[in-house]
Image (spheres, rainbow, N blue to C red):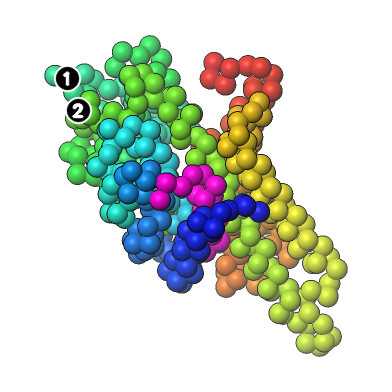
Amino acid sequence: MYRLTQEQQDIVARARDVAEKVLRPQAERIDAEGVFPREAVTALGEAGILGMTVPREFGGLGQGLRTACAVLDELAQRCASTAMVFNMHLCGVACYAAAPKAAGEQLRDVARGRHLTTLAFSERGSRSHFWAPVSRERAEGGRSVISAEKSWVTSAGEADGYVVSTQWTSGKSPIESMLYLILQGDRGLAVDGPWSGLGMRGNSSSPMRLEGVVVGPERALSPPGKGLDIMLGVVLPVFQLGQAAIARGIAEAAVDATCAHLTSKKFEHLGTSLADLPTLRARLAQMRIETDRAHAHIVCTLDSLEQPGPMTQLLVLETKAAATEAAATVTEAGMRACGGAAFSRHLGLERNFRDARASVVMAPTTDQVHEFIGRALCGMELFA
């Protein structure tokens, strides 16, 4: 359904191979122990997948969102935690590429598989309103000093680079912001607590604290005061489509697990299988429809982004809500269809069920997206 070229299919096949050989065997342990999928990230780097969206002039594969979604879908079918880490990496790479002079060295390292990046937008003070940092940079001797309490930083303490937002020193409101590249070794950057989530337990989404981190103007990833423009124009499409693809991958995994269980398990005293029950077949059919519907919405949005029109913004806003809510519905249906076998965890459905719910509450949450869509439909400014 993604309608990929041969080159894109080859890249997805390479990612699928890593997913089967590295992600799938480790997914249960990563979830159970809540450990970061370092081996998976290394394998993706060695396969060139970390640099998939890096422009070719920096040594990357120069791919766009269509290939990225197909890859994220494949990863999420095996390990949603790794897929989440990779999606936030793609968001960071998009920021690097939007300001290549500031991050050319990092782009080359990403292409070599030696640099993992992520976003550090949300703050404790503004919570899921990721676009409105409460921290404010301080100008000092031609450089910027940043102090902030960041929440829910995927790959916290594991990434090599962080795209950090803060209010612009000359800004009059929180949406007049700046984005800076902060590197793992910068003094004053630290993880500020453990991560133990309900789902996507391996993505190391811990809070981080910046205490007087000093950066020069060469680390700026946005024009003065224009951080919001990068967040919405560069990051949001990658994040929204990426999370939608992850949700579809989780739903696909749930459909596969449910179908395998229904067709293989029997009522031995009756000589029939679970699939002989029409109610369970109907539930499986509904799961398939919801998963395919989410897939179609993603592809429609990709088409619109490649040929922008009046519906493009609305489709981008819709796609994460549509797919993540579909995944929540599909995984719950799978749990119901498989009953006690699903609750005992050995089917993997229980992990799919929990992972699917992470993105529903991930900024922008489904409720926030509904508000954005409603405002857009009413001709109102999204950020009044």
Amino acid under disc 2: Gly
Q: Could you tell me which residue is drawn at 39 percent across and 18 percent down? A: 176
Locate residue 146 relative to residue 380 in the image: left or right.
left
- Tell me residue 208's x, y (percent): 32, 40
Establish if 77 lies above or below 135: below
Q: Please indicate, yes or no, whether residue 259 appears anywhere in the rendered image.
A: yes
Q: Residues within 10 Å of mark 1 (few under 14, many from 20)?
A: few
Secondary structure at badge 2 equals loop
Q: Is residue 71 magenta?
A: yes
Q: Given the current orientation, which residue lies at the most extreme left position?
A: 141
Q: Earlier in the sequence, mark 2 or mark 1?
A: 1
- Tell me residue 62's x, y (percent): 42, 46
Q: Quadrant of residue 303?
A: top right
Q: Which residues are magenta?
A: 61-78
Disc 2, disc 1: CB below 8 Å?
A: yes
Q: Nearer the viewer, residue 282 or 192?
A: 282
Q: Quadrant of residue 319?
A: top right
Q: Main secondary structure of the magenta part?
A: helix
- Tell me residue 149's x, y (percent): 33, 33
Q: Is residue 257 magenta?
A: no
Give the CA distance from mark 2 to mark 1.
7 Å
Q: Could you tell me which residue is drawn at 63 percent across and 60 percent down? A: 252
Establish if 156 lies above or below 276: above
Q: Quadrant of the C terminus?
A: top right
Amino acid under disc 1: Gly
Residue designated by label 1: 142
Locate residue 78 relative to residue 193 in the image: left or right.
right
Locate residue 280 relative to residue 4 in the image: left or right.
right
Res 216 label: 2
Q: Could you tell me which residue is drawn at 58 percent across and 36 percent down? A: 305
Q: Nearer the viewer, residue 339 or 200?
A: 200
